[in-house]
Image (spheres, rainbow, N blue to C red):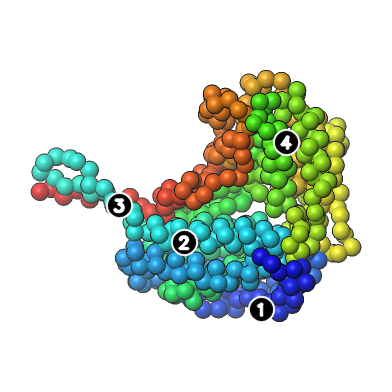
Amino acid sequence: MEATRDDWITRAKTLTLPGAHVIDGAPHHGGGTFTVVSPRDGQPLAEIADGGPAEVGLAVAAARRAFDHGPWPRLAPAERGRVLTRMADLFEEHRAELALTVSLEMGKPITDAHDIELRALINTFRWYGQLADKLTDEAPHTAPDALALVTREPAGVVGAVVPWNFPLTLAGWKVAPALAAGCTVVLKPSENSPLSALRLGALATEAGLPPGVLNVVTGDGPVTGRALGLHPDVDVLAFTGSTAVGRHYLRYAADSNLKRVWLELGGKSPNIILPDAPDLEQAAATAAWGIFFNQGEMCTAPSRLLVHSSVAEQVTEAVVARARALSVGDPLDPATEMGALVGTGHLDRVLGHVHAGVDSGARLRTGGERVLAETGGTYLAPTVFDRVAPDSRLAREEIFGPVLSVLAFDDLDEAIRLANATEYGLAAGLWTSDLSTAHRVSRALKAGTVWVNCYEEGDLTVPFGGFKQSGNGRDKSAHALEKYTELKTTWIQL
C-alpha cells in the first residue's frame, strides 16, 4: 500500500458513504436517522437510517421468504460457494474503499484496516466459499435391515449482531459460514461502525447474492438489536460483544421462540512470560503489540501481563519503551501505529479505569492521559501499570483500551492461579522454552485459545471462541458451521 496520508485524505473527501438499510436486495430508508461521527476528528461522517422494530420486521420477513421459498438454500453447495468467492473478489476490488470506511468510522489505522481487516474479510469469504461443497453427511452402520442417515440442514434465518472494533472481520466470521450453510441473514452492525457493513451488503447483492439472503439493518442495540433478538422468526442469533449485552440476548431468546444464541463475549486475557522464554525481548515486544494493536480494543487483548519476578522489571521496562515509541496519531497516516478510540464515551470509560488504577495504588509507568485533543479526535497514550493488585479493577475488569496491567509471580502454580482468576476465558499466552511446561500450562489454562511463544496467530482452519463468561460456540473453521446447521436423523426400515 503506497498511498500517503494526503492521498487518503483526498480519497476521504470524495468517498460516497451509504445511508440506507439493505433489505431484500435494495436500499431502504425507513425509520429515523442518526449521525455517525468519526473518532479521527470528532466530525460527522454521515446521516444513516435508524432502524426500529418495523425495519427489523421487514428484514426478517425478507430473510424468511428467501429461506422458505427462494433459491439460496436449494442451490448446490458448490454454487453457493461460487457466489461467496465472487463476493471475496468484489471485496478485494473495493479493498481501499472499504478500508478507508473502517478507518474513518472507528479510528483504526489505515494500514491495519487495509492490510489486516480487509485481508481477514476477503480470506474468510474465500475460505468458506471453497469449503461449501466439501461437507459430508453420515450414514452410520446400523442393523442390516435399516438405513440410517444423519444430514446437516441449514438452520434458517440468522440474526448476526457484531461490534465496532473489527466491523468487517467479525461480520465475515458470522455471515460467510451462515451463507455457506444455506441460511439467510439479517446483519445488525454497531451504531458506531455501520457504514462498512452497509457497503458490504450492497456489494453482496452486486456479487449475485439473491434478494433477502443478506439484509443489513442499522440502529442501536437497545432498540434495533433487541427487536432482532426478540423476533420469533429468527432461528439463530450470533452475537459478538460484551458479556453484559450477551446476557440480554439469552433473555430475548427465552422471551421469544427459544432461538439458539451463540455468544463471543469479553475477555481479560493473561499473557505469561517465564524466565526461560526463547527471547525475552521478543516476548516483551509481542506483549506490547498485543495490548496496543487496534488501540487495545480487542476481546483477546493480552491486558494482564504475568511475568516471573526474576525478569519482571526487565520485561516491564522493555514494554514501557515500546509504548513510548509508538506512533499515535491520525488513522489516515500510514505511519500511524495506534489510532483513535472509537468515541468520546468510550474514551471516558477507559480513562475511568486508569484513574481507578491510580487510586488503587498501582504504579503508572507510562501513558494514562488523553493526547491530541486539539484534533477533536479521541486519542489515548499507550498506558502501562505495574504493581497491580490481583483483586483490583485493573486486574479483573475488561477495559477494552490500550491499558496494560503487569503482575509479578514467583512460581508456575501461582501464574496459573492468577491467569485463571477471572470470569472470562477467551484467550491466553505463554512464553517458555520447555515443551513439557508448554503442554502442562496450556492444558491448565481455562481459555478457548492458548498461544505459545506468539500471540494473535492463526488462520481460518482453527476455531475461535471462549470458556466461562467469554461465551459459547465457535467462529472460524469448519466448526463454525455447527452454529448454522441442524442435525436431522432419517431412519429407513428396509
Across and down, in percent, residue 371 comes to 86, 55
Mark 3 secondary-structure assignment? loop
| Residue that label 3 marks | 136
- Residue nearest the viewer, comparing 432 with 35: 432
Mark sitting earlier along the chain (2/3)? 2
Mark sitting earlier along the chain (1/2)? 1
Mark sitting earlier along the chain (4/1)? 1
Give the Cα separation between the discs numbered 4 and 2. 36 Å
Across and down, in percent, residue 423 comes to 62, 36
Mark sitting earlier along the chain (3/1)? 1
What is the quadrant of residue 355 in the picture?
top right
Mark sitting earlier along the chain (3/4)? 3
| Residue that label 2 marks | 126
Q: Residue shown at 62%/57% (left/top)?
A: 116
Q: Is residue 493 left or right of residue 311?
A: left
What is the quadrant of residue 287 in the picture?
top right
Give the Cα separation between the discs numbered 4 and 1. 45 Å
What is the quadrant of residue 362 in the picture?
top right
Residue mark closest to the camera, 3 vs 4:
4
| Residue that label 1 marks | 16
Q: Amino acid at mark 3?
A: Thr
Give the Cα separation between the discs numbered 3 and 1. 43 Å
